[in-house]
């Protein structure tokens, strides 16, 4: 059963982490395949042979799969996972290699290296990819260290200069709060250059406020999701 897009999954945390241990290398290999597909200069015969091998691998993986979206799952221990997320999904090979760090509540950052798969203008990161990264980072910053749920209300992005492919750093911090609205500011940097700036309003839904503020609400929700 699901609530607010979150589904209860009784998989123990230790098993979730065990599965991540072998699915993450798979996703990394597929991400590398995407990069190799863009850059390769092998001949037609080799491309066709690789295509057949990839098709065979896809058929093997599809012998057992879930239907529809992967969704966000949470277990009774409070562990949540979102393996299909377009930006940080551990099993999503099209997601950039983004690992977000939280040094303190309301402040977050990440350093990553963007290759050919994320190119827009020649040699530059696609502007939409920058916005995608910022939206994810700012949303997680608004959670104040994952103590609350927050969804994007508005996002304003200003492109100061092109962002070169390669190593970049993104930073975000909570600027202020007004009721259920959290105002977050962020930047994308390449070296010492600020390439992109962003401002966003993130909103904590009413049901999430109830879970955070009312004693027993989490237990009640889990019982509802279990059908109890």
Image: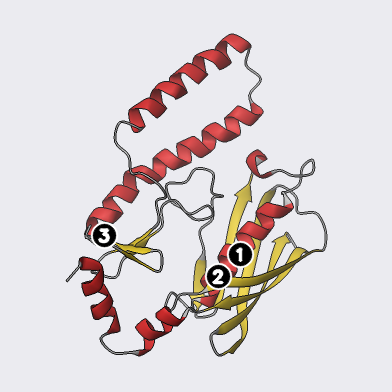
Write the residue at 82% across / 63% down.
Answer: 160
Q: Position of residue 61 (x, y in %)?
A: 35, 32
Q: Is mark 1 on a helix, strand or loop?
A: helix
What's the CA distance linking mark 1 and mark 2?
Answer: 6 Å
Q: Where does label 2 land, which residue?
A: 139
What's the CA distance linking mark 2 and mark 3?
Answer: 24 Å
Dot placed on the residue nearer the N-terminal end, 2 or 3? 3
Q: Which of 145 and 209 is in front in this view?
A: 209
Q: Where does label 1 land, which residue?
A: 135
Q: What element carries label 2?
A: helix
Q: Which of 156 and 210 is in front in this view?
A: 210
Quadrant including the N terminus: bottom left
Lateral position of residue 82 relative to residue 15, left or right:
right
Tell me the tag on residue 9: 3
Q: Position of residue 144 (x, y in %)?
A: 49, 79
Residue at the farthest top position: 45
């Amino acid at each position: 059963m699901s609530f607010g897009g979150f589904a209860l999954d009784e998989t123990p945390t230790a098993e979730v982490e065990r599965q991540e241990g072998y699915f993450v290398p798979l996703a990394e290999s597929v991400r590398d395949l995407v990069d190799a597909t863009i850059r390769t200069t092998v001949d037609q015969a080799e491309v066709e042979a690789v295509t057949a091998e990839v098709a065979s691998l896809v058929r093997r993986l599809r012998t057992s799969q879930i239907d529809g979206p992967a969704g966000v799952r949470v277990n009774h221990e409070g562990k949540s996972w979102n393996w299909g997320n377009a930006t940080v999904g551990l099993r999503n090979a099209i997601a950039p290699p983004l690992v977000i760090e939280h040094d303190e509540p309301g402040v977050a950052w990440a350093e990553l290296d963007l290759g050919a798969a994320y190119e827009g203008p020649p040699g530059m990161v696609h502007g939409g990819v920058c916005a995608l990264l910022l939206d994810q980072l700012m949303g997680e910053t608004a959670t104040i260290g994952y103590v609350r749920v927050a969804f994007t209300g508005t996002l304003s992005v200003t492109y100061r200069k092109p962002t070169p492919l390669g190593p970049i750093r993104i930073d975000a911090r909570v600027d202020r709060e007004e009721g259920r609205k959290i105002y977050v500011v962020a930047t994308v940097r390449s070296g010492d250059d600020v390439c992109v700036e962003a401002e966003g309003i993130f909103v904590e839904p009413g049901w999430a406020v109830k879970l955070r503020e009312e004693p027993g609400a989490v237990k009640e929700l889990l019982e509802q999701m279990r059908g109890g």
